[in-house]
Every structure is written in C-alpha cells, then in structure tokens.
Amino acid sequence: MKTFQVPVGISNRHLHLSEEHIGILFGAGHQLTRTKDLSQPGQFASEETVTLVGPKGSMPNVRVLGPARKATQVELAATDTFKLGVKPPVRDSGDINETPGLEIVGPAGKVQVEAGTIIAARHIHMTPEDAEKYGLKDGDHVKVQVNGPRAGVLERVLIRVSSNYALDMHVDTDEGNAFGLRNGDLLDVILD
Amino acid sequence: MKTFQVPVGISNRHLHLSEEHIGILFGAGHQLTRTKDLSQPGQFASEETVTLVGPKGSMPNVRVLGPARKATQVELAATDTFKLGVKPPVRDSGDINETPGLEIVGPAGKVQVEAGTIIAARHIHMTPEDAEKYGLKDGDHVKVQVNGPRAGVLERVLIRVSSNYALDMHVDTDEGNAFGLRNGDLLDVILD
C-alpha cells in the first residue's frame, strides 16, 4: 500500500457565476473584485456576495468565486440545504444536469436559476506530473486517511488532473467538521 | 473480519439540563414535557427549547432532552460552534471537565454555565447481551463502514454498554451530512 500526502482545503458554501448573471446581479459590465487568491491557479475569492433564496429560507453573504464561468453553479454543504429547503445531489463540479435551482439576489437585481445547485463531491486537484508520479489519471477515485479524535477514511475521492491545477484536496464544511480537519492539514492518500 | 449491523441516529444540537437549571430557565418546580421518545429507553425530546448565547452569536430554539441529569451538558455540531464562537472539544458524554461554558436563556430566566459544552464523540449504545454476542466491552472502539456517494469509514467509534441501552449508533449532524446518512440507515460495524 503506497501513499502520498495532500493538503486539504475546506470549502465554505460559495457560488460561481456566468458573465450574464454577474451583469444582472451586480450591474451591466461589472467585473468581480479579487480579494484573495485560492489554491487553484487563477481562481479567487471576490469581494462580492449574494443572498440565496430557497423554498424554506434564505442565506445572506454567500461568497462569489471568480473568474466567471460558463454556467452558474452554487455549492452548498448539506447542512445549508436544510435551511434553504433544497435537495441537491452530491455531484462533481460542472455536472449540473437535473439539479435544483435557486433564487440568487444581488445588489443590482436577482435571477432564478433553473439548475446548478450541488453538494460538491470531494476531490483532489493535481497536475499531470503529479498524476504520473502517483500512477493516477483524471476520473480515478482514491481513499484518504484522517487521523485524530475524529479519525476515519474518506472513500470515493475523485482525482482531477489538469496542468492548471495545484495539488490540493477539497472537502466541504460538513466533511471538514465531521473529520476535525483544518485548512492545510496534510492527509494520507491510500493507493490500493 | 466479522461484522454486524447497527442503525444510525443523527443527533441535532441539543442539551441536557440539571433540575436546578430547569427551575431557573422554566420556573421553580417545572417538569419537562415529553413530546417524543428517543431510541434509548427513558430518554425523550421535550417541548422545551432554549436560546444558547456565545461570544460571537446566539442560537434560538435548541431542544432540551429529558429526563433531567446531574450536570447540564450542551452538545453541538462543530458547524454550530463557529456561529456561537465557542471551541468545545470532541468528548464522550459526561466528560465535561475543562470544557467551555455558555449562556443559556429560557422563558423564566437565564444561567451562565461555566463548563459543559462538547462536541459529542460518535458512539454505539448496546446492551450487555449485545456486547457479549459481538465480543465487545464498554469503552472499546470500533470502525463503522458507510457506503453510498459519500462512502467512508468512521473510526474511533466508542462502545457504550448498559442494560438501559438499546442498540443504536449516534453521530452528529456534521457527521450525518458528511457521510450522506439518514436516520435509521443500517451501517456495518467492522470488528478487526
């Protein structure tokens, strides 16, 4: 059983917006304001936030990540879904067919998106060089060991490979809390 | 590797109160009003709720479980602790030495408890008959396998044995959400 270590990043609820939706929510021609670079090259947290409105409740101050994407995608922890009253599936990023929509409210307007709400499946970003070194390819799944008071194994962790990526594992706040993780913790990937 | 199945129960944030604190919060001589029996014999959800107040925020409508206990104990999911601004450790129920306090507000009064806030360690209740059958004893730890889209293994699951118990595994909402669990799901206990 070979292993290698990966740093973990815990994603709070957030959303990615299309250019069109940025215009509606923040005003025509608006550009997102970068406040913090994220672990993946080119990705950033923006100054902009929105309010999400679901059938059962609303959630203010949800962070928009940049840059703009082709399709708007809202990524929630399962804990959040109960407050909003939506039932999104666990999905890989980008796979939003037949997922629930939400109302998104910004300072300049609002949009009702018909799909795009997911609970993001845990995944590891890596470069083609990393993938070759570890004998992995895009779309593989691995197990990851967590130690400490809430020890356990995360199974079905998706491997995502791109030359635009940096080595980092992404989980959501429910997973981070359930396993007692902190940002930057180094976890052991188990290669069977 | 032998195994047996255990039903899971997902505990939302809740608290247990001493007789003294019930009197302060709900009025002298007040008795908790049973609304629903819980999985463990004699334990019940009550009609009564309180507001928890921490350094960073408050949380209304937190359920009181009955009957009264010797010491007040507040059990939170890690997700809750960020809203309140408290940093409780992961602890077995009853082990509240050097844990943070909180302000608890009820309809008749409020108390500032100096300790008693924990994130409950996951555990399995069972009878002495079950324990004998599976070769386990009180204080043992086991692993539990979860299948499905958020598959994984919960390690360090405490075994608690008493003739007052019924076979049931308790996790909190963070753990339930991170593993995609629903109340009553049957999980496989792994006996090495």
Image: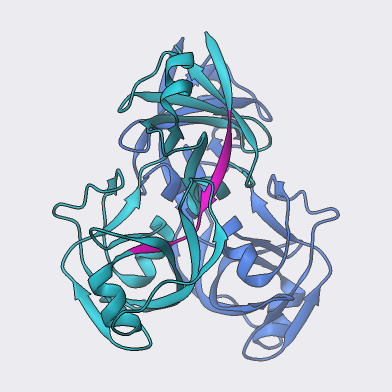
Chain colours: A blue, B cyan
Question: Can residue A40 be seen in this snapshot?
Answer: no
Side of B134 relative to B119 (left or right): right
Q: Which residue is rendered at x = 52% and y = 8% of the image?
A: B1
- In front: A102, or B3? B3
B123 sits left or right of A24 in the view: left
Which picture quadrant has residue B4? top right
Displayed quadrant of residue A115: bottom right
Residue occupying the point 40% across, 77% down: B50
Quadrant of the image containing the C terminus of chain A: top right
What x and y, as percent, mark residue B107? Answer: 38, 88
Number of labelled discs? 0
**Residue bounds of the magenta highlight:** B6-16
Q: Does residue B154 lie above or below B34 as drawn?
A: above
**Can residue A176 be seen here?**
yes
Q: Position of residue A149 (x, y in %)?
A: 31, 37
Q: Main secondary structure of the magenta part?
A: strand
> Is residue B126 rendered to the left or right of residue A66?
left
Q: Is residue B189 above or below residue B32?
A: above
Left or right of residue B123: residue B146: right
* Residue B111, x across and y down, in percent: 23, 79
Q: Can you give x and y, in whole percent of width and height, for residue A2 in the image? A: 45, 12
- Which quadrant of the view contains residue B66? bottom left
Furthest toward the front, the residue is: B29
Residue drawn at point x = 42 percent, y = 57 percent = B77
Instruction: Reply yes or no: does residue A102 show up in magenta.
Output: no
